């Protein structure tokens, strides 16, 4: 089969990105423009501000990705873009850009589910083997996804309330650490030790997740300690929050491995950058010698368009083409993508 060159576009949250990817796993160019420093000032992503910045940056990142690739639009076989899930205003910018280029240059369109991008990002560092189990942990999602083959997705469990990254960000805000909270808690927890007892999350189904009770537990702990005049040890509270949150993730991943017996386990999403989670997953792998474990490098844990270009390759070979009538889908369904 001839090489497939996909131009990927991502704008679902606070990164405006474009990349050119060959055959699903070779990056020709990869440009990401992050808005984190702007949203940091507000303590979280402000959707209206995010979409305005996407509008300012989208053409710039697309031109830069093409320039860096030394390719022209003639070399591009298809345009892949994040159709959802994400912030509606942010998604619209990438969707419109993708449709405009596709129309102008007469290229096929590949609408991509953002989490499929996170999962296929692992293909940049390792072969992907099926059946595959993905632990998807990001700012908007906490999911155990089973794939018996390429482009086939079964959600084994998901969060009943907050996503894990959202819990990190909210707890960080309570502790006065700012946005994004995940990397800050990760750092402080390294110097913390056990001091506070926090509630263990309870769920209706053993493979589902719940983090809102744990988040409230942190809030109540802060209020209780302040009421009796104690100063909170932020390092220890960060440590205890992280240990409880990650213990539940590990326990559920273990159940999924035992139920489904996958050949490979991959980590995906922004929280996959967490140093403690990465260690715990490697340790978990020691109990399953036949299970291949893939942990993506830090650069492809957070949002980027290379992962959308990678997913685009598999969408292309599985005939998941879209057209100019498609629009942004903020709560896009993974299983029917
Ligand atoms: O995948 P991502 O870039 O955006 C979404 O698709 O949601 O994930 C962003 C999330 C944020 O909640 C951020 O706090 C979290 O990933 N995150 C981390 C770490 N780095 C980023 N959480 C825990 N530890 C980290 N080192
Ligand atoms: Zn993401």
Image (spheres, rainbow, N blue to C red):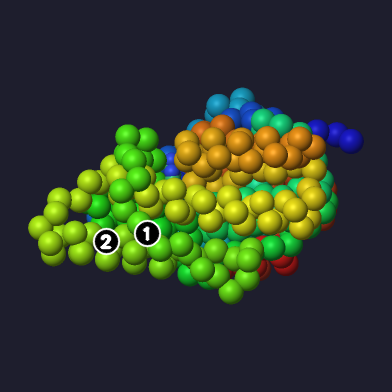
Residue at (31% x, 48% y) in the render: 195
Query: Is disc 1's CB within 8 Å of ligand 1?
Result: no
Q: Mark 1 points at which residue?
A: 198
Q: Earlier in the sequence, mark 1 or mark 2?
A: 1
Q: How many labels does the image show?
A: 2
> At which x and y percent is residue 266?
66, 43
Q: In this view, does 81 lie above or below 62?
A: below
Residue at (55% x, 40% y) in the render: 280
The 10 Å Cα crowd at callout 1, few under 14, some 14 to 19, many 20 or more, is many
Q: Quadrant of the C terminus?
A: bottom right
Residue 85 seen in the current view: yes
Residue at (68% x, 35% y) in the render: 286
Question: Which residue ends up furthest to the right in the rendered image?
Answer: 1
Q: Quadrant of the N terminus?
A: top right
* Secondary element at image label 1: loop
> At which x and y percent is residue 240?
37, 49
Query: Is disc 2's CB within 8 Å of ligand 1?
Result: no
Q: Mark 2 points at which residue?
A: 221
Instruction: Name the one closer to the observer, 206 or 299.
Output: 206
Q: Are marks 1 and 2 in contact (CB under 8 Å)?
A: yes
The 10 Å Cα crowd at callout 2, few under 14, some 14 to 19, many 20 or more, is some
Q: In this view, does 280 lie above or below 164?
A: above
**Spatial separation of the CA atoms under disc 1 and disc 2:** 8 Å
> At which x and y percent is residue 54?
42, 51
* Residue 92, numbered label: none
> At which x and y percent is residue 198?
37, 59
Residue 180 seen in the current view: no
């Amino acid at each position: 089969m001839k090489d497939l060159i996909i131009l990927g576009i991502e704008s679902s949250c606070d990164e405006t990105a474009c990349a050119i990817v060959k055959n699903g796993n070779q990056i020709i160019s990869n440009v990401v423009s992050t808005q984190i420093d702007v949203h940091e000032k507000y303590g979280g992503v402000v959707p209206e501000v995010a979409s305005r910045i996407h509008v300012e940056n989208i053409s710039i990142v697309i031109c830069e990705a093409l320039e860096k690739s030394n390719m022209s639009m003639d070399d591009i076989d298809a345009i892949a873009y994040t159709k959802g899930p994400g912030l509606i205003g942010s998604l619209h910018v990438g969707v419109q850009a993708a449709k405009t280029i596709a129309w102008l240059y007469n290229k096929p369109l590949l609408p991509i589910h953002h989490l499929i991008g996170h999962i296929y990002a692992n293909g940049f560092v390792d072969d992907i083997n099926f059946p595959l189990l993905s632990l998807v942990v990001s700012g908007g999602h906490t999911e155990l996804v089973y794939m018996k083959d390429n482009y086939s997705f079964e959600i084994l469990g998901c969060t009943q309330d907050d996503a894990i990254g959202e819990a990190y960000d909210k707890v960080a805000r309570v502790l006065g650490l700012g946005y994004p909270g995940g990397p800050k808690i990760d750092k402080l927890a390294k110097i913390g030790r056990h001091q506070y007892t926090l509630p263990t999350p309870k769920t209706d189904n053993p493979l589902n997740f719940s983090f809102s009770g744990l988040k409230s537990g942190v809030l109540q702990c802060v209020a209780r300690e302040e009421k009796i005049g104690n100063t909170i040890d932020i390092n220890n509270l960060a440590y205890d929050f992280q240990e409880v949150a990650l213990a539940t993730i590990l326990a559920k991943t273990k159940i999924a491995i035992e139920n489904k017996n996958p050949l490979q386990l991959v980590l995906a999403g922004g929280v996959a950058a967490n140093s403690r989670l990465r260690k715990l997953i490697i340790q978990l792998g020691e109990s399953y010698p036949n299970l291949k474990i893939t942990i993506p490098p830090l650069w492809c844990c957070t949002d980027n368009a290379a992962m959308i270009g990678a997913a685009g390759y598999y969408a292309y070979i599985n005939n998941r083409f879209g057209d100019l009538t498609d629009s942004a889908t903020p709560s896009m369904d993974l299983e029917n993508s």
